[in-house]
Amino acid sequence: MIKQTLARIRVTIKKQIDKIDDMMFLNSRNIMITRSSKKLNDKMLESFKILTEIEHAYRLKLSSTIKIHSKFALNLL
């Protein structure tokens, strides 16, 4: 049952971000942000362009100020 639900969610998300060159918001859940309080952090970072699809992940075009890897799983978009 869980595998079926995850497969259905994966298909739904894939339909939403099916096109390369679309813009998607990035979830800030696992990204270290320097602020005085975690409560004040934004839940979603700015919108980034999708460059390529890599298996179950996507490579985003990040701004030059962000110093992290550009490959993100579906659940972070």
Image (tube, rainbow, N blue to C red):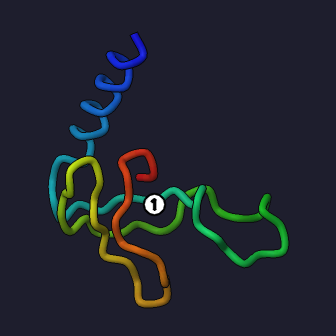
Give the amino acid type for the residue marked by disc 1 in the picture. Leu
Q: Is residue 62 above or below residue 50?
A: below
Relative to 54, residue 10 above or below: above
Most foreground residue, 53 or 55:
55
Element marked by disc 1: strand
Residue lying at the far top of the rendered structure: 1
Total marks shown come to 1
Residue 33 position, x and y percent, is: 66, 73
In this rendering, position of residue 5 left or right of residue 54: right
Give coordinates of residue 4: x percent, y percent.
32, 16
Reading the image, the residue beneath label 1 is 26
Among the 4 quarters of the image, the one containing residue 36: bottom right
Determine whether, in the image, residue 38 is placed left or right of residue 65: right
Question: Where residue 25 appears, x then y in whole percent?
Answer: 43, 59
Q: What residue is shown at x 30% (from left), y 62% (from top)?
A: 23
In the rendered image, residue 58, in percent from the top left (x then y), is placed at: 28, 59
User: What residue appears at the point 77 percent right and 64 percent down from the top-left corner?
Assistant: 40
Q: Which residue is at the front of the view, 25 or 10?
A: 10
Please rate how many residues cluster around mark 1, counting C-alpha atoms within 10 Å: few if below 14, some from 14 to 19, many from 20.
many
In the picture, measured across the screen, residue 25 lies left or right of residue 39, that is left
Quarter occupied by residue 63: bottom left
Residue occupying the point 83% across, 67% down: 37
Quarter in which the N terminus is drawn:
top left
Q: Residue at x 26, y 42 (%)?
A: 16
Quadrant for residue 11, please give it.
top left
Q: Farthest bottom residue?
A: 64
Q: Is residue 42 above or below residue 4?
A: below
Viewer-proximal residue among 14 and 6: 6
